[in-house]
Amino acid sequence: MVTLDDLRSFVAVCGAGSLSAVARDSGVSQSAISQHIRRLERELGVPLLERGRRGVLPTSAGKVLLAAAEDGLRSIDRARRELKRLKTGELGSLRVTTGGTTLRHLMIRPLAAFRRKYPAITFDYVSGVSTSQCLDAVRADRADVAYVTIGGDDTLEVIPTVRTEWVLVVAADHPLVSQPAVALHDLAGIRAIAFASAARSRSQMEQQLAGHGVQLQYAATVDDWDTAVQLVELGVGQAIVPALWIHDLDKRRRLHALPIQELTPVTFGWAARSWDALPDFAKTFTVMVNGGIASLGPSARIELVT
């Protein structure tokens, strides 16, 4: 099988007009250079070099290969330089897909730090209102990584990072505030503000409730957790949300978050087509986001997944 070294040796011999000169400059034996040339000739089935009065010259077939090899090697060398710049963060873009709440709560500060570390990298936010929509964006190469609800079989490489409890967000004067936690049967009497019906986290939560014979009565449906919490504040209803998204609820004195008993925590994490194929700066961004989540404190009610 022809290798790049075969082509590079052939181009070098044509330029120098001598196998021995190329061997000397390369620090290898002349027989090693000859092997490169013979492998090319066996593969192509034509002689590529002939001896002239001034040394070794390409044959007619050799001239055709020489022109193609020079163009190809220049393109490959250019690509290698670009790939090196991509790997070191001197060039490239990072496309992240997730929900708007995740971007606002978990990625703004890491993004600022990322831009300081990699000023040449373009950051593109690809909006997604559900886990399936975000994963579709990664599969279709519209995004490099997704931060989503983890669960179910998938064709992508998924890395869980954090589990967080479900909580019920109510007005500070709601009758349930007097309880330390909410039992599942208490949820049957609330006017729930629902997340998008296609959201994986909602389907996971509803499956658990159905298993306990609880069916929610919905007052409204929204496409992000921040809107759900705002509607609670306006008296529209109550919201069942992952505690991670209301880690800063103490800023809203008129609201209260109650842990929900018996609901399995929801898991969030990253998804990519191939984790190993991601440039280093993309992995660095995920580490920055993970670090920010880990520092949120007890109000986020999180458990890190290692």
Image (tube, rainbow, N blue to C red):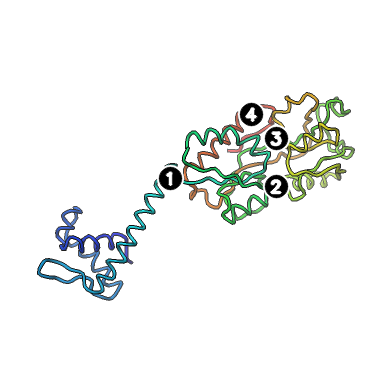
Alpha-carbon neighbours of circle 2 within 10 Å: few (<14), some, or many (≥20)? many
Contact check, label 3 and label 1, Cβ < 8 Å? no
* Image position, residue 304 (x, y; %): 62, 35
- State how far apart marks 3 and 2 are (Cα): 15 Å
- State how far apart marks 3 and 1 are (Cα): 33 Å
- 97 sits to left or right of 43: right
Disc 2 marks a residue whose amino acid type is: Val
Residue 129's label in the rendered image is: 2
Alpha-carbon neighbours of circle 1 within 10 Å: few (<14), some, or many (≥20)? some
Q: Describe the element under mark 2 as helix, strand or loop.
A: loop
Q: Which residue is label 3 attached to?
A: 245
* Image position, residue 207 (x, y; %): 78, 48
* Image position, residue 13 (x, y; %): 20, 62
Alpha-carbon neighbours of circle 3 within 10 Å: few (<14), some, or many (≥20)? many
Q: Which residue is label 1 attached to?
A: 87
Q: Quadrant of residue 65?
A: bottom left
Q: Describe the element under mark 3 as helix, strand or loop.
A: helix
Residue under the image location 17 percent in, 68 percent down: 57
Residue under the image location 52 percent in, 48 percent down: 275
- 262 sits to left or right of 115: right
Q: Nearer the viewer, mark 2 or mark 4?
A: 2
**Residue 184 versus residue 291: which sits nearer the camera?**
291
Q: Quadrant of residue 53?
A: bottom left
Q: Which residue is label 4 attached to?
A: 296
